[in-house]
Amino acid sequence: MELLEELELEPHLVHPSRCKAIASARLKNDKVDARTLAQLLRADLLPEAWIAPQATRDLRALLRHRASLVRLSTMAKNRIHAVLADRGIRQQTGLWTGIGRVWLAELELPPTQRAIVEDYLALLDGLAEPITRLDHQIATLARADPRVQALMVLPGIGRLTAMTLVAEIGDIGRFPTARKLCAWAGLTPAVRNSDRKVRHGHITKQGSPWVRWILQEAAQTAKKRPPFADTYAQLARRRGRSIATVAIARRLLARCFHILNQLEAAPTGEGQTGCARETA
């Protein structure tokens, strides 16, 4: 993308699933694909996706990098827990605090298990510094963004969740309705219509997996608080807790849409986000 922009060429980001629906071919190779894309572009039928500005792409990369490091840290902690459980050792609370680390260091373990624990502890120590640095960097960016502050009024949405939603959604003006945003995030059920029969399946899981992941995390807290607690309880009794949690995530995203849409429509100086709208 950056190379095309440096060469002053206009980039086009093609929506893969829609393009496949329009121009599915039995013979598929680079030459055929290039000819098909050129013909669609010439006829103004190329299904294009939104190209995020460079600032938005950088913010996405920053947040995804932090999430990857946190997942590595969680994996290391889980492996240490597994080693202790395998030895039948009852773990104390606060294993990663100062007292917990001293307890781990003094714990009697066979040489192999001790080496595994020490390696994962070293990995945790190595990850702590970049995660802390990224947290400070993200906090600085969040304070300067009115969209983040506005989203944080919703239950279950903290600074990192709000920053992830802002980065992944980008320009809220791309979505005419809250339902369109939820469909883009893959949080709406698949629908199959035949004659007068309508069948609703599981959620489509299309769009950004980061949005679905962060909203699922936020929904775990939001479903216990008003105004979502009663709705969650009713849905959980009828459809089960998993489906009810997904429904709360979808409702959270719909509320995010209205908040961001109001900020986008606000006059300059009264909550204007300044998020440039860019289409291919």
Image: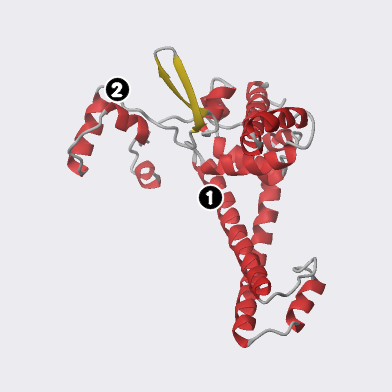
Residue found at x 64% / y 73%: 86
Residue with the most extreme top position: 196
Image location of residue 72, percent across then percent down:
58, 62
- The residue wearing badge 1 is 61
Residue found at x 59% / y 54%: 67
Categorize mark 1 by other alpha carbons within 10 Å: few (<14), some (14-19), many (20+): some
Look at the numbered disc 1 and give the secondary structure of its residue: helix
Residue in front for this viewpoint, 93 or 270: 93
- Residue 44 has which mark? 2
Residue 12 in view of the camera: no
Judging from the image, the colouring scheme is secondary structure
Answer with left or right where residue 38 lies relative to residue 210: left
Decide which of tag 2 and tag 1 comes sooner along the chain.
Answer: 2
The alpha-carbon separation of the residues under discs 2 and 1 comes to: 32 Å
Residue found at x 59% / y 58%: 71
Residue found at x 54% / y 29%: 188
**Residue type pointed to by label 1:** Ala
Categorize mark 2 by other alpha carbons within 10 Å: few (<14), some (14-19), many (20+): few
